[in-house]
Image: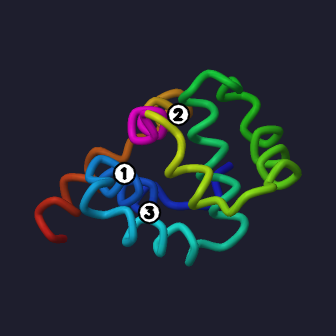
Amino acid sequence: MLDITTYKIAQVVLMSRELGRAEGELRAFIDRLSEDEQASLVAVMWIGRGSFEAEEIEEAKRTAYEEATTPCADYLIGTPHLSDHLENGLDALGLSASEDEDDLIRGG
């Protein structure tokens, strides 16, 4: 289903909440992801935003590949409410990053 772990999504969620402080770190993190991971990350965000339904995850990933005209980090960082959309997308897919987020906050 997803080509990215919930742990990596949790990292993006936490960094996007701290954009003023962590934008450079978030940009570098997203840039280091593989194309498959980036497409999955965008697809999860789109599902959370309501652009696709959870059942359309494969179509959303394909669309993310086909419509990638700007760098993924630029696109995601420019998306209002990114962390909320990612969490909502995971919820819709029956996944959760909350344990991963807790681990990251504790320095795990």
What residue type is disc 3 on? Lys
What residue type is disc 2 on? Gly
Segment tinted magenta in the rendering: 81-87
The x and y percentages for residue 69 are: 81, 55
What residue is drawn where x is 11% and y is 63%?
106
Q: Secondary structure at mark 1?
A: helix
- Tell me, for residue 89, which label it has, or none: 2
**Residue toward you, 78 or 82:** 78
Which is more foreground, mark 1 or mark 2? Answer: 1
Q: Which residue is mark 1?
A: 16
- Tell me, for residue 8, which label it has, or none: 3
**Residue toward you, 27 or 57:** 27
What residue type is disc 1 on? Ser
Q: Neighbour class for label 2 at 10 Å: few (<14), some, many (≥20)?
A: many
Q: Neighbour class for label 3 at 10 Å: few (<14), some, many (≥20)?
A: some
From the viewer's perspective, tell me whether residue 96 is left or right of residue 1.
left
